[in-house]
Image: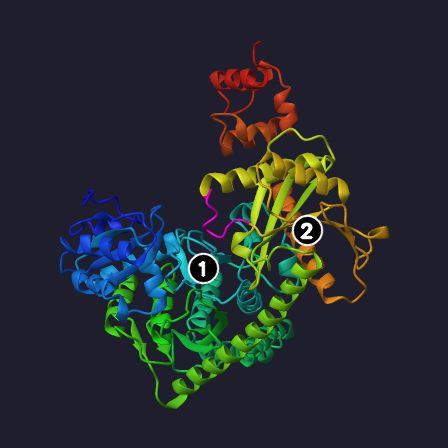
Amino acid sequence: MDRTPADRPEHPRDAERFSEEKATYTVRGTDTPDLEAGIAAIRNVLKTLPARPGVYRMQDARGEVLYVGKARSLKSRVVNYTQVMRLSKRLQRMISQTRSMTIVTTRTEAEALLLEAQLIKRFRPPYNVLLRDDKSFPFILLREDHAFPRVQKHRGARRAKGHYYGPFASAGSVTRTLNALQKLFLLRSCSDSFFANRSRPCLLYQIRRCSAPCVGRIDEAAYGELVEEAKAFLAGKSTGVQTRLGKSMAEAAERQDYELAAVYRDRLRALTYIQGSQTVHAEGLGDGDIFALAGKGGGVCIQAFFIRGGQNWGHRAFFPAHTAEVPEEEVLSSFLVQFYEDMPPPRRILVDRELPERAVLEEALCQRAGRKVAIERPQRGDRAKLIEQARRNAEEALDRRQAESTTQAKLLGELADVFELPDVPKRIEVYDNSHIMGTNATGAMIVAGPEGFRNNQYRKFNIKSAITPGDDFGMMREVLERRFARLEKDDPDRASGEWPDLLLIDGGKGQLSAVCEILENAGVHDIPVIGVAKGPDRNAGRETFHLPNGREITFPPNNALLFYLQRLRDEAHRFAIGTHRAKRSKSLTTSTLDEVPGIGPNRKRALLMHFGTARAVKGAALDDLERVPGISKAMARQLYDYFHPRG
């Protein structure tokens, strides 16, 4: 047995949590791909395994993580894997692939549960239940680092000073709430630089979406009152806000200030609209998340409702992966611990069933939140009705998903038949390029499979080589060479499922021939390629599909497979265009001055104020540079030498 020292913490915040009690063991067995070899590897590690809480990782012969588990007693848990006749077929398959184990001990079972979630997210093992959609949720941020706080949408790490409200189920939910906040409380949404450089109100003031603090139309104290009202509204105290608005409207009308009364009336209407648009009513719940699970035909859907301050902030359906042969209660528990890995848990979580080791999960979430978190299963009353509503939504979402999957499977089977593919494709990669006369050139790859588009597998490629304007062949060559070089490096055995079963290329015979040549040079001979040529006058519905053997296929109008292929092509085009536009927009806000060492925002501003453009700075004489306020002679010399290097 090989024993290796403990690694560094798996995650930065693990340093404190696991610094006191941590030990890592790696045990290797034989490379024979059978059940006995896996059992032998597990029995070897049992010889020195402590009866303490911790996390274990099972790995195959290549060191890839197969499964991550946690245990109150590592020895008691791991020994169960040697009793294979009591295990499910799924776990027996896992053990037959196991060749090594890595053990990390922790102080408590709750700490082990938190570490388990981090490792599952990091390694995404094939035998763990996985949260398929791990995209970060949007929040509303009410910043407090300015005299006139700004309200804005926020994703990612919460480093800015201010109040965060969320999560919201979608960007659309945030946008609707932000629009309501602007109508209700007239808070600014502009950036600080935009705010600082205004000399007159912007359009939002004209349409009564902002109180124009940038030009003094409202003082700091009055604006602060609006901010406090917004906080009360976001905290669920909309009744008090409604009362104050009604009173202010009545007072303005009594003073015959009908214009101001109309402003309050419009704000009241906006508030009434929001209150009436709630599809889930959860008065009295405060802050809470609601989860219900539906299982059918081997599929699982978890429906989540997000309630904050008694208001519905949206709902979302999740479809976890790797749930076959896993009890539904275990699926929901694993989902929750992964879901709250990057999400602050609310004070109350409602679920539709009893969870195994609920107390441990509560303790782990309490540690993460730094306060009490309760997991409840309501049996009666309004909260039970909320659970029932979530369960009904989960069942309907799962039915829709499975109906779509059936249609998708039928289309993929027809695709394999029509194009004479060796098998039904499980991973289709579609490529496209976008540029304007060769500038800001980008390549894009989208991925689709039996479950639909796999957005988290999409890839962008910044074209790095010198491309002749309009040379689509050259751009496609670079994209594919980089893509398959990376695949060969990361997964030469094609075991990860990242290799495509079919390539779809936007282009005709010439583009297809170029792609086939690229793949041949890369040593890839067994991946089918289809070229999609636009029809006459670029009409959709008259496309011609080209195969490497020279065969051409066209479809009659209204053909379902044709529509499917068009969706794939159009999605790649949409993604490529969006990537190109983002790159082009970024290039419009940067200049050559950004690349000069020592030139920060203040010096850049001084130079542009003095010369007008970056091009003028580049062509300026040394004497002219020295005259710029804030630019020393040494900096002027450095700047001049940067743009005029000596040969």
Q: How many marks?
A: 2
Q: Residue at x 68, y 31 (%)?
A: 467
Q: Residue at x 48, y 56 (%)?
A: 154
Q: Is residue 440 visible?
A: no
Comparing 31 with 234, the one in front is: 31
Label 2 is placed on what type of residue?
His
Q: Residue at x 63, y 63 (%)?
A: 412
Question: In the drawing, does residue 572 fall left or right of residue 370?
Answer: right
Comparing 278 with 267, the one in front is: 278
Element carrying mark 2: helix
Name the residue furthest top.
Answer: 647
Whether 618 is drawn above or below 578: the answer is above
Residue 6: say if magenta: no
Label 1 is placed on what type of residue?
Asp
Q: Earlier in the sequence, mark 2 or mark 1?
A: 1
Name the residue furthest right.
Answer: 537
Q: Give coordinates of residue 171: x percent, y percent.
A: 54, 62
Q: Give coordinates of residue 385: x percent, y percent.
A: 43, 87
Q: Give coordinates of residue 403: x percent, y percent.
A: 59, 74
Q: Which mark is residue 407?
A: none
Element carrying mark 1: loop
Q: Give coordinates of residue 432: x percent, y percent.
A: 67, 46
Q: Quadrant of residue 332?
A: bottom left
Q: Which mark is residue 573?
A: 2
Is the residue under label 1 in contact with that under label 2 (CB below 8 Å)?
no
Which residue is disc 1 drawn over? Answer: 134
Numbered range of the magenta stretch? 491-499
Residue 496: say if magenta: yes
